[in-house]
Amino acid sequence: MTSGIYISKRRKKEKYSCSECNKEHKSECKGCICNVIKDFINKEFFIRTKSSDVIVGTIIEFDKKNCCVKILSPETLSPKEPAEITIISCKDIESITFAFQKKINL
């Protein structure tokens, strides 16, 4: 879609504005994780996916337009593995776990 024109095989060319587009194509990033993940950028997590994989890393980016979460997993020394970036939809994350920093009086 370039220059504000939508082309359909069944219709003539139609003009649209950004406000119309935003009303019709709202973000599909809904749910518990998708709603809160933007608040946890640059924090380290254990992330459990819906397929039961566990990703340990830092959330470096969240795109609410397409629901993509970028996670940076650090390099490991044993076994030697390079740092990796994983891109996953927030809809495919089952849970996130992180260290609680507050002292608790027992």
Image (cartoon, rainbow, N blue to C red):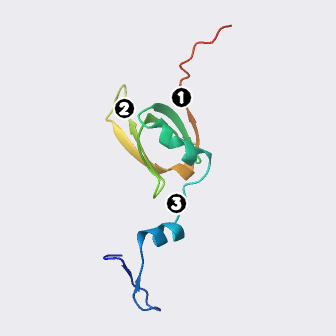
Q: Residues within 10 Å of mark 2 (few under 14, many from 20)?
A: some
Tag 1: amino acid: Phe
From the image, tell me which residue sits under label 2: 74
Q: Earlier in the sequence, mark 2 or mark 1?
A: 2
Distance from disc 2 to disc 1, alpha carbons, whole Å, reads 16 Å
From the image, tell me which residue sits under label 1: 98
Tag 3: amino acid: Ser
Whether pointer 2 and pointer 1 mark residues with C-beta atoms closer than 8 Å, the reply is no
Please tell me whether mark 2 or mark 1 is closer to you in this view.
Answer: 1
Distance from disc 3 to disc 1, alpha carbons, whole Å, reads 27 Å
Q: Quadrant of the N terminus?
A: bottom left
From the image, tell me which residue sits under label 3: 27
Callout 2: SS: loop
The residue nearer to you, when weighing 63 against 44, is 63
Tag 2: amino acid: Pro
Q: Residue drawn 46% across and 91% down? A: 11
Please tell me whether mark 3 or mark 1 is closer to you in this view.
Answer: 3
